[in-house]
Structures are given as C-alpha cells and as structure tokens.
Image (tube, rainbow, N blue to C red):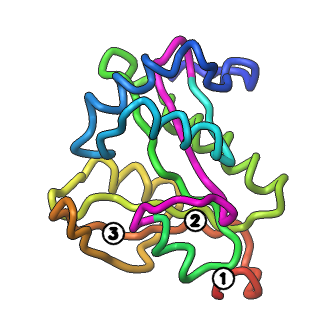
Amino acid sequence: MRRLGHDQLLPISDTLESAVLALNNAHAIELSWLDADQLRVLIRGAFYARRIGEIDAVLLAFDEDMTYDSPNYRWFRARYRRFVYVDRVVVAESARRHGYARQLYVDLFEHARRAGHDIVGCEVNHDPPNPASDAFHTALGFVEVGRGSIHQTGKTVRYLVRVFESDAHSLAV
C-alpha cells in the first residue's frame, strides 16, 4: 500500500466536479445516481469532501447540521444528536488496492475528532449484498446498529457506526 501525506488528500475543486460525477455515477448501484446540481449541493454542504489524486478516490461526509433528504442520513439524524455520516466513498477501478479508501477514512476520523465528534456512521447495502464493503468497514471498527429498507430503490441497508470514545451524551438523541 502506498502511503499518502495529508497534503495529497485534497479538497474537491469546482473544476473536478464533472469527473467526480462520472466516477459516482459509474458506481450508482452502490452509491446513488446524482446530477451535477445535486453533487454541487452535496460538496458545498459537506463536513468532509476530499479526494486522492486527480479523481482516484473520493469521500463525502456530512455532520448533523446538513440539510439533506437522504433516508439513510435521516436515519442517523433521528437517532444521534452529533455525528458524521459518510454519504459516499468511491475508488476508481484503476486505483483500487492502494489503500485509498482506508486513507480517506483515517483522515475523516482525525477531522471528526478534531471537530469534537465521536461517532462516524454509514450504511452498507445488505440487499443487494456488498461483502467487500462489509469486510472493509468491519476492519475499520464499524459495528451494525440497525437496518433499513429504502423504498425508492428497493435496497436493504445495514447502518454502521464507529465510536471513538464511550461518551454517552452523544450516542442518542
């Protein structure tokens, strides 16, 4: 695995939004399809929006202050007072097996801790299954805290959290 410095985990500039959109939509089954305006709103409102390389990997995450209509984000918002929600992480096919997703997550964890968060949540498809994502998130210390069905897509998801420290005041609403 090639290690990157924090200076190589870069913000997503306006000029790269079309490339991010193409990468996202190439993986719409795992993520969700976006149009250019939707992506722009997500990037602008993100707690964390970083990339590796030109667009080798991307991670977008939101905190509890985001105005976002995603049923998965709303699931976390209904249950946690403070949290960071990983909305999408994607690695280009040509950039896989370099540890980029892990490096983005580790950077996100550091960013979340510095901002006073102790919970990072996400969802992983249960049906259709995503065993690679399940294994990846388990290795990063995520545990399942619930399941849900997304009626618009027919997907069933597993809700996962990574808790940094046991601080009961931020675990529940």
Question: For this rendering, which residue is in front, 86 or 13?
Answer: 13
Q: What segment carries the magenta color?
A: 52-72
Q: Do the residues labelled 1 and 3 touch (CB within 8 Å)?
A: no
Question: For this rendering, which residue is in front, 1 or 144?
Answer: 144
Q: Name the secondary structure under disc 2.
A: strand
How many residues crowd around disc 2 within 10 Å: few (fewer than 14), some, or many (20 or more)?
many
Please report whichever mark, 1 or 2, sits nearer to the chain's N-terminal start: 2
How many residues crowd around disc 1 within 10 Å: few (fewer than 14), some, or many (20 or more)?
some
**Quarter of the image where one finds residue 164:** bottom right
Question: For this rendering, which residue is in front, 78 or 127?
Answer: 78
Three-letter amino acid code at the position of disc 3: Arg
Q: Distance between the residues labelled 1 and 2?
A: 11 Å
Three-letter amino acid code at the position of disc 2: Arg
Residue drawn at (30%, 76%), measured in percent from left and top?
Answer: 148
Looking at the picture, how far across and down is residue 72, in whole percent?
Answer: 41, 66
In this rendering, is residue 79 above or below 130? Answer: below
Indicate yes or no whether the magenta region holds residue 16: no
| Residue hosting label 1 | 171
Question: For this rendering, which residue is in front, 36 or 22?
Answer: 36
Looking at the picture, how far across and down is residue 56, in whole percent?
Answer: 46, 19
In this rendering, is residue 78 above or below 43? Answer: below
Q: How many labels does the image show?
A: 3
Residue drawn at (46%, 34%), measured in percent from left and top?
Answer: 37
Residue drawn at (53%, 64%), measured in percent from left and top?
Answer: 121
Relative to residue 117, is residue 121 drawn left or right?
Answer: left
Q: How far apart are marks 2 and 3 (CA)?
A: 13 Å
* Mark carried by residue 158: 3
* Mark carried by residue 162: 2
* Mark carried by residue 13: none
Please report whichever mark, 1 or 3, sits nearer to the chain's N-terminal start: 3
